[in-house]
Image: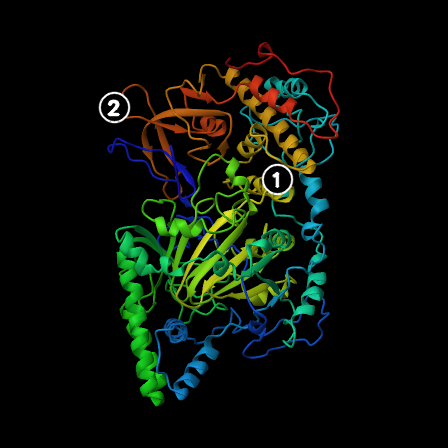
Amino acid sequence: FTVEHGVVEKKITDSSCQFQPLDTIHDAQETLPDYPPTKRMKTEEGEGSGEKREVVENKDSDGLMHQENPDQKLPTRPEVPNVGQPRNHYGKTNVHRESRLWFAKSSIVCVSQQKDVAGLTEAARRVFKNINDEVKETNCNAYIVPLEETAPMTSDFRGLSERLDEMVLADPIELDDVSASTHDYPDKISFTGAPLLDPMTTSSREVLEAAKRRRNTNENHVYQKFDKTKNKYFFDGCNQNVVPKELEFFGRFRGEELAPAPGYLPVPIYQVDSLEQMPRLLEVLLSTSMSVVRGLGDVIGLNPDDFLIETLAKVKHDYDLICLRQIPQKATTNYWCVPLKGKKRPNPREWACYDAHHTKKLGEFSEYYEKIQDLVREAILQLNNNLEEADKITEELANKMKESSMPMDGIDGIAKDATMGAFGTNMDLTDTTTWPRQAANVNLFPDSFRPDGCGTLLNFAGEMIAGLNKPQMYLKLPGARTTGHLENNCLTSLNYNMGPGDCVWYGVPMEYAAELQKIIAKKMSLLTMLVEQFWGCEEEILKAGIPLQKFIQKPGDLAYVGIGTYHWVQSNGFATNLSWNLATPTYTQLAVAAACHDHYLANKYSSLMPIENIAWNMVMRKAEMDEKMKKLLKNILMRSLANSQFEIDYISKKHKVFTIRDAKTGDVKLDSVERCQECRQVLFNNVPVVLIKEHIPKQKGKPAKYVEDDGTGTTTVPLVFCFECCSKKKFRNVTVYQRYTLVTLASLFDGFKVLNDVPSTSGTPSASDFHSTS
């Protein structure tokens, strides 16, 4: 079993047995669901990290509808500023010509500012300034905030602490009538809702005895039945008192700049001049929705030249790079690359995003990247000598850039006039043998920021996942988009911009996630809310009373995306970004991750973060933690222990189908974390494995089909399935590999003490109390 692109895939040594990889590619900050060629792939590139911006960057080129009052409060239904042409009124706009011109102009702006472009006349610089004004982003707000300043409500994360406690640390309740499941296989574990036993005072024996009652009744007497309706939207109907206080706080640091337009929430820029400031920096970042950290690269001696695309291509020109093909466009529009049948004029298609994707060799991508820049440099020289021909030269450049596009490799369905830019995404840097200089640069980051450092709970996961605790790179031309998303399990993320161009970031604080999701569900589909990626419309977000963060990430800026922040990103120049996730070792982060797990469960989406594994490993390794984190772990452990008993009883009940073996002595070697081949559920302790001789991939309207080995196949592959999928697929011969006996788990549970834990007279049970292997 191997982990690649954030998913567990089986190694298949016999080429005659072809299995399709899971249809989701995770990168630490850009997730890529594998859709048909013209469907949008989600990219999570550490672009979920906070954006950066300086005070001088707060001034918009048009100065639209700003308020002078620094104590401005966010109105419930703010007056909406002019954010560009409304999405539903494009009129007779020539979409693809506008796209080409934006691509060309943004490229000119970026390249003309590079050090190797010299000898420009003053008149030429004025022309370039005019071009810059045409493509400059508006309504971007970020202020330099001294590290010693404390933002409002830092002790109450986004005003959600009480709500979070109610979800994951609910007081135990008594039920006269426990709802029974409609099936006999164990339900997927959930972490929210009230327990029916008190985790702080209940012994493992009492937990397991209560869990055994499910065998004959299908009733869970350990914790409340999962409520999908309460978890459909993320933190629905919660406290939203933080943003007005933040607006007042940020007003103190905007200097002479105009106040943000109504509805926009600034982000702080924290300047770092020494590693001695890191403890304070971490403290202020923990409560932020999005932030910019400036100066860290210089402090640690990061070398951007090691991440130049031409440098990377020289190291491994035959690297298979996933390329997204997108229409370059300004951030306030959302054109599609597919023609509209029967339509004479373009349709913005609301929030949905379409692109194509394929794989290219890194060397080929590098050649395309350099060719486009050479065309731009040539045009800049022409403009310098023929200013009166500026419009003509720009138009010719736009056409040349289209003609020089990378081949689409047979991808059809794209409008013939579309200029398809290329975005090299999810480039994995974990092979230190291939990328020693790049790995050395990553190791320069402070330990609390490194993907494998002390500042992440993912160290307890037992696996490496590309994009989460593996660094990845994103190679961008102007217009490359990472569409709207939450980081996996609402983790934080870091995104460092190597430059030379800027990126524009959007963000929505976690306390407004549910309101944003309701717009997404209405604009697209409730069923695919967490799968289909979107490009949020500024105008509609502001009209809904949802505060919007928008800022520019300059070269050398590290964007920090806080817990549970929705975000989307676009490069407005040529840029290379380095990104990964962090699971900050705090109660808030683990609690939000657990709540997000249940939000996924309610929406039939899989949780990538192995929460049970992390919790038990923290206990086994005696991790240091505060008492509130201990309470959370005790709650998780109780549910997990009960779930293991549910599974053991189900195995015993279905003994003709299931055979249990010790994973340590079994004939199949398990990875540290295993997931169901079909639904991607993480399987902590009891791992069902089925020998499959044939796999028929899923097709439109038809699920994947797995043909179980009946003794006649010449080649079989062991695949992991959860108990629910085993039942639904009617497998007849399943081997369950058990990692830990119930005795072991029970001993760990009883030995893990919380300060207000009340000693129980019931001791740890013996092996005779369990239906388990010894």
Q: Is residue 406 visible?
A: no
Q: Residue extending furthest bottom?
A: 388
Please state the horizontal and vertical placement of residue 743, each as a whole percent of the image: 57, 17
Q: How many marks?
A: 2
Q: Quadrant of the N terminus?
A: top left
Disc 1 crowd, CA 10 A, few/some/many (<14, 14-19, 20+): some
Are dots 2 and 1 in contact, CB under 8 Å? Answer: no
Label 2, label 1: how many angstroms apart (C-alpha)? 44 Å
* Foreground pick, 304 / 242: 304
Q: Position of residue 666 (x, y in %)?
A: 40, 19
Q: Residue at x 58, y 54 (%)?
A: 276
Residue drawn where x is 32% and y is 88% of the image = 386
Q: Is residue 660 left or right of residue 630?
A: left
- Mark linked to residue 714: 2
Classify residue 187 as left or right of residue 758. left
Determine the image quadrant of residue 692: top left
User: Which of these two is toward me, 705 or 481?
Assistant: 481
- The nearer-to-camera label among 2 and 1 is 2
Labelled disc at residue 228: 1
